[in-house]
Amino acid sequence: MFIISNGKMLIKDQFSTRNLLIDEGKIIAIEENLIETGSKLVDRVDASGHLVLPGGVDVHTHFDLPMFGTVSSDDHYTGTRAAAFGGTTTVIDFVPMSPPDDIKGEAEVFHRSVTTWQEKARKAAIDYAFHMNLTRYDAEIEAQIPDLLEMGITSLKVFTAYNNRLRLDDGSIFKALRLAGQHGLLVMAHCEDGDVIDLLTMEALQAGHITPEWHARTRPAWGAVAASLKMITLAAQADAPLYLVHMNTAGEVDMLEYARKNKVKVMGETCPQYLFFTEDVLRRADGAKWVCSPPMRQRQDNERLWQGLEKEGLQVVATDHCPFFFDGTREINYEGQPVKIPGKELGAINFSLIPNGLPGVGDRLPILWTFGVGTGRLTARQFVDLNCTNPARIFGLYPQKGALQVGSDADIVLWNPEKKVDYGVAVAKHRTDYNLYEGWELTGFPEKVYLRGELIVDGDSWLGKAGQGRFLKRLPGAEII
Ligand code: URP
Ligand code: ZN
Ligand code: ZN
């Protein structure tokens, strides 16, 4: 049992001094006045000068994910450690579908896929849940969708791009939405136009265009808008909830707002990279660092996404953390060990071979605080809602996660709003050789991070452990907000 005293907690929209009593990993009391514990000797952590925030909930990560002939460079330990240093204490990671088995075919495909991911995630240092990618669809697979509920997985991701790999046809997506709706599952959608992308990519390569900017030029924003609208119309017809991941264009925000106004049960997420960068970064000599799908867009898209956050048209900020090394031929030192993992250099002479994805899980809260709250674009309440509470509500983790309430897990960040940080790869703890926000001056940073009452980050010190994270089984029928 211990007390966190004299920190400022968000009460409705204002910060007020509160004392929190923590026992067995839970918050058991929140008091305005000093908490009396009688004769019992209880440790006190003085949080004066700090904000007491709920741990961040990042519902979009890809740890240890094989793709593009390599693997995303953070595994479930290094990625969750980096998350914790950035104030995030819960992640939801995507499980890819295992290939059909030689003997059993598609039998038990979700069980096999989830077992593989549970093995990998065993070393997570913060709490975690899973989404299931739905990248093949037939009657046999359909019949197994309810199995996911037993495994505590209540969300499925579908793709309208990556033809012949991850994409489902519209009819299958409709069937999946309808079934998901009946079972209280949430379908998440990656929205791009797979047909146009494939054609433009082939034409670009034939014309000898090999540089990273062609990644964006072959994935037009209108394709994302059209695919978002298509997904929305399918969800409306299936009367099922929908969640749009990594929204990146102004038109998508318009579609989302239109659909919500018309009572379609759709919610949307964007990621910090889409708020700050444009496709111009791809023309830099190190442009491959920013290659992800969907790609960076234009300044007006950044602006419209910000408006979406400010006006509550968008519900969630997540990261789509899927890091690769910029130069995977060179070792870095990670926790005293040399590491090198093939990365962006794999696409040095062909943009379509650059591994798609970026680091971000540890960056989200500090970046959004400085450039959202610090600039007055977001209130502190919006910051907490977008990064902690809303994701927990939408994905069935609230109020255990994403909130500081009596009975919630004691996942607590003591946030120093005055702390100045010269941010970059040396500060962020991702297992990669670069950071998107290199040299950015931040004001406000997590100073102490608790996971279920255990101090796991204390300034620069890592006190967490591999395997300390627990798998969070989720129940169906989570909130639609
Ligand atoms: O480029 C990205 N975003 N890679 C991760 C996979 C995805 O589509 O979210
Ligand atoms: Zn995606
Ligand atoms: Zn993703």
Image (cartoon, grey):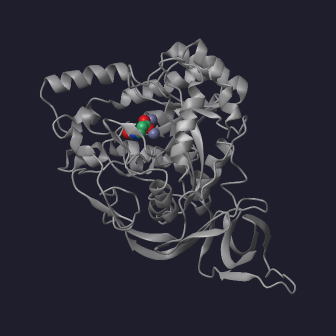
Where does residue 4 sit, x and y in percent of width and height? 69, 76
Of residues 453 and 221, the one nearer the viewer is: 453
- Please identify the quarter of the rendering in which residue 473 is found: top right
Where does residue 419 sit, x and y in percent of width and height? 47, 76
Of residues 306 and 418, the one nearer the viewer is: 418
Q: Residue furthest right?
A: 38
Q: Residue furthest left?
A: 208
Q: Quadrant of ligand 3?
A: top left
Of residues 161 and 72, the one nearer the viewer is: 72
Residue at 54 percent of width and 43 percent of height:
119
Q: Tell me: residue 371, above or below residue 180.
A: below
Residue at 12 percent of width and 28 percent of height:
208
Taking the image as shown, residue 81 lies to the left or right of residue 260, namely left
Q: Residue furthest front?
A: 103
Where does residue 168 sit, x and y in percent of width and height? 48, 19
Q: Can I make out residue 212 in this image?
A: no
Q: Can I make out residue 230 in this image?
A: yes
Q: What is the number of callouts on the image?
A: 0
Q: Quadrant of the N terminus?
A: bottom right
Where does residue 197 sit, x and y in percent of width and height? 31, 24
Taking the image as shown, residue 85 lies to the left or right of residue 3, namely left
Q: Tell me: residue 304, above or below residue 44.
A: above
Of residues 271 and 474, the one nearer the viewer is: 474
Q: Tell me: residue 361, above or below residue 357.
A: below
Q: Quadrant of the C terminus?
A: top right
Residue at 25 percent of width and 25 percent of height:
201
